[in-house]
Image: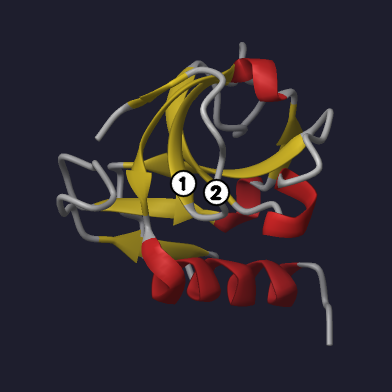
Amino acid sequence: MMRPVGSMRTSGDVVDLELGTPEGREAGFRHPAVLVTAQRILDAAPSVVHVVPVTTTLRGFHSEVVLEPDAGNGLQHRSAAQCQHLRAVSPGRVSEVRGNVGTVALAQIRDVIAVILDLP
C-alpha cells in the first residue's frame, strides 16, 4: 500500500516524515503522522501541509486518538495520533504514504484538534 513521494495526497493519509530534532516534549525524528489538511487545500498543491504525529506509546491523554492497525492504515502496532503536536510541515518532509486512517478516525482527530484550538 506504500505510495512514493510525489503521489497524490489525501486527507487522512498515514505518512512517514522527518520531524527533525525535537525540543522539550515535541515529537521529533522520523515518525509516521496523519495528514489532516483539508482535501481542497491538498488538491491545490500547498507549500505546507498539516500533520499529527503518531506514536506507539499510548498515554491515555484526551488529546490523543487511538488508532488500531489494519491493512488500510498501514500501521503495524496499536498507536495514538498525538493531536496536541499538530504542526505545519513542508510536503518535502513526507517520504511515503503507508495508508489512510479513514473518515471516522480522521473526524475524531479533527474533533480533538478543534477542542485544542477552541474552535466552535
Q: Nearer the viewer, residue 3 or 108?
A: 3
Q: Residue at x 53, y 75 (%)?
A: 107
Render colour scheme: secondary structure
Q: Residue furthest bottom?
A: 120
Where's residue 24, x and y in %?
A: 65, 27
The quadrant of the image that shows the C terminus is: bottom right
When the figure is inspected, residue 96 is found, relative to residue 66, above or below; the finding is: above
Q: Residue at x 51, y 27 (%)?
A: 7
Q: In the rendered view, does 49 fall on the left or right side of 73? A: right
Q: Quadrant of residue 49?
A: top right
Q: Which mark is residue 10?
A: 2
Q: Is residue 23 visible?
A: no
The quadrant of the image that shows the N terminus is: top left
Q: Amino acid at mark 2?
A: Thr
- Tell me the residue that label 1 is attached to: 13
Q: Residue at x 55, y 31 (%)?
A: 27
Question: Looking at the image, do the residues carrying marks 2 and 1 touch, with CB atoms under 8 Å apart?
Answer: yes
